[in-house]
C-alpha cells in the first residue's frame, strides 16, 4: 500500500498546526484517524467519551467502556499525544437512552446511533472541545466533507467504502459542526485502515469492529427494553386471514420485518411482522419474506433536517434523488413531495420493511442532503 498517497488523500483544507480533539472510542478507525492527523502536523489530543458504564438496566457486564478507554489511552501513549476522558453519562441517559425507551414505548423503532451523533458527538463533545481550546474535532466516521465554492457551504458526502459509509448516522449535522469536523478515514476502505493500524504499530490494530448501540455495545436489546417496559400480552394476527396465529409480549418488543422471536409454528412459510396496532395491542404478520404487505413505495417524514440550511425545500421536489430507510440500505431512487405541509418521500420502486421511528436519509448522488424520522 502507498501510505504516502493515503495521507495525501486524507488532508483537509483546514490549516495545519490547528489543535484537534479526536473522539477516540478505543477502536481501530478513530485510532488511525488520530495517527493520520498527527502525521499531517495537527496538534492532537485524544479524548475518550465515557457515556455509559452500566446500571440497573441489567447490562453492566455487557458494557465494555473500561477496556475501550484503556485501548484509547494506549493508542495515545503510542502516538505520543495527550489523552483525556470526558464524562457525558448524565447527558447520554437524558438525550439518548430516554429517547430510545420513549420511542419503543410509542411502538416505534428508534435509531440511538443517530441521536448519539446529534446530541453527544457533534454537540456536547464539540462544545466541550472548543471550550477547552480545540480548533477542530475529528472522528473515525467513514464519511467525507467537501467545501462547495459555488454555494459557499460544506457538504457531507458518503464514505468511499460502500460497506462502511456512515453518512446515514450523521444526517443531522449542521454547517457549523461540519466546518469544525475532520474525518480522516472517509477517503479509505476498511482494509486500508487496518493496514495503516499495522503500519503505525497501534496496540489495537487487530481489535474487532464494535457492534450494537453507540457507546453501550453489544447488548441484548430485548433484555434492555424489558428492564423498563412491562410485558403485556396480545394477539398475533395473520394480516391475510385475519386469524390469530400466536401471542406476543407487547408490540413494543417487535419491529417491522422481524422474523425471529415470533414463536409461530406449523406455517408453510416463516412469518414476518408487517404492522403494529398500538391502540389494540395487535401484532400483524404475513407469511414469506417478500410478502406484498412488507413493501411500500412512499413514506412520511417528521423532524426534517437539511445540512445546507440555505436549501430551498421546494427546489428539491424537482430533482431525482435517492434515499436510505435504514443503515446499509442502498439508497434508492425517489422524489420528494410536499402535501399539506407534510414531507413525503416517494420511491420509484417499493421498499421493504419501512419502519416508523427509523431515519430516512436523502442523497443527491454521494452528497447527503439531510433526512428525517419516518412517521
Image: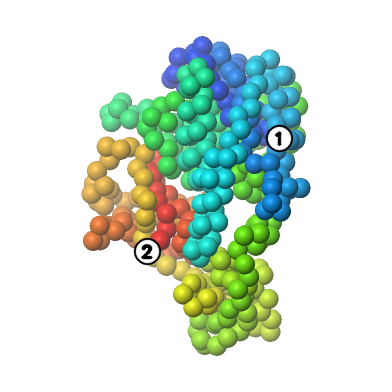
Please tell me which residue lies in front, 233 or 168.
233
Query: Of the numbered discs in the image, which one, if any, rests on residue 245?
Result: none
Residue appearing at x 50%, y 33% in the figure: 124
The residue tagged with tag 2: helix, strand or loop? strand
Q: Residues within 10 Å of mark 1 (few under 14, many from 20)?
A: many
Residue at the image position 27 percent from the left and 40 percent from the top? 311
Q: Position of residue 166 (x, y in %)?
A: 52, 42
Percent across and percent down for residue 231 are: 63, 70
Q: Is residue 22 left or right of residue 78?
A: left
Image quadrant where one finds the C terminus:
bottom left
Res. 192 visible in picture:
no
In this view, 115 is above or below 28? below
Looking at the picture, how far across and down is residue 228, in whole percent?
62, 60
Q: Is residue 252 above or below residue 316?
A: below
Residue 280 seen in the current view: yes
Residue at x-position 39% and y-position 35%: 174
Q: Is residue 198 left or right of residue 252?
A: right
Residue wearing tag 2: 298
Q: With respect to residue 226, does 285 lie above or below?
A: below
Numbered-mark total: 2
Choose top left, top right, bottom left or bottom right for residue 243: bottom right
Q: How many angstroms separate mark 2 from mark 1 (CA)?
A: 41 Å
* Front-lying residue, 30 or 215: 215
In the image, which disc is placed on residue 68? 1
Residue 3 point in image, percent of width and height:
62, 22
Which callout, 2 or 1, points to the residue nearer the camera? 1
| Front one among 360 and 356 | 356
Residue placed at 47% from the left, 19% from the top? 135
Amino acid at each position: 500500500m502507498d501510505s504516502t498517497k493515503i495521507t495525501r488523500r486524507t488532508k483537509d483544507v483546514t490549516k495545519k498546526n490547528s489543535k484537534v480533539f479526536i473522539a477516540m472510542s478505543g477502536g481501530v478507525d478513530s485510532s488511525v484517524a488520530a495517527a493520520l492527523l498527527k502525521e499531517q502536523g495537527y496538534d492532537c489530543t485524544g479524548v475518550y467519551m465515557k457515556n455509559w458504564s452500566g446500571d440497573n438496566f441489567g447490562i453492566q457486564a455487557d458494557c465494555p467502556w473500561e477496556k475501550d478507554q484503556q485501548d484509547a489511552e494506549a493508542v495515545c501513549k503510542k502516538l505520543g499525544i495527550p489523552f483525556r476522558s470526558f464524562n457525558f453519562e448524565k447527558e447520554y441517559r437524558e438525550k439518548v437512552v430516554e429517547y430510545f425507551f420513549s420511542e419503543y414505548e410509542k411502538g416505534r423503532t428508534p435509531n440511538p446511533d443517530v441521536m448519539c451523533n446529534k446530541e453527544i458527538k457533534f454537540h456536547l463533545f464539540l462544545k466541550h472541545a472548543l471550550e477547552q481550546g480545540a480548533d477542530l474535532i475529528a472522528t473515525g466516521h467513514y464519511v467525507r466533507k467537501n467545501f462547495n465554492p459555488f454555494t459557499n457551504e460544506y457538504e457531507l458526502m458518503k464514505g468511499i467504502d460502500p460497506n462502511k459509509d456512515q453518512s446515514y448516522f450523521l444526517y443531522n449535522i449542521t454547517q457549523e459542526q461540519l466546518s469544525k469536523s475532520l474525518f480522516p478515514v472517509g477517503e479509505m476502505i476498511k482494509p486500508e485502515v487496518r493496514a495503516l493500524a499495522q503500519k503505525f504499530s497501534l496496540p489495537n490494530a487487530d481489535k474487532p469492529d464494535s457492534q450494537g448501540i453507540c457507546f453501550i455495545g453489544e447488548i441484548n436489546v430485548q433484555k434492555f427494553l424489558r428492564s423498563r417496559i412491562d410485558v403485556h400480552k396480545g394477539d398475533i394476527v395473520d394480516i391475510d386471514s385475519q386469524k390469530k396465529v400466536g401471542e406476543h409480549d407487547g408490540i413494543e418488543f417487535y419491529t417491522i420485518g422481524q422474523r425471529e422471536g415470533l414463536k409461530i409454528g406449523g406455517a408453510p412459510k416463516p412469518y414476518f411482522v408487517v404492522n403494529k396496532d398500538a391502540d389494540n395491542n395487535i401484532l400483524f404478520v404475513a407469511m414469506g419474506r417478500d410478502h406484498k404487505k412488507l413493501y411500500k413505495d412512499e413514506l412520511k417524514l417528521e423532524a426534517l433536517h437539511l445540512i445546507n440550511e440555505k436549501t430551498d425545500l421546494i427546489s428539491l421536489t424537482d430533482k431525482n434523488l435517492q434515499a436510505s430507510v435504514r443503515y446499509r440500505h442502498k439508497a434508492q431512487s425517489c422524489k420528494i413531495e410536499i402535501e399539506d405541509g407534510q414531507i413525503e418521500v416517494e420511491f420509484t420502486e417499493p421498499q421493504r420493511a419501512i419502519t416508523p421511528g427509523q431515519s430516512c436519509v436523502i442523497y443527491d448522488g454521494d452528497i447527503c442532503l439531510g433526512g428525517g424520522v419516518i412517521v
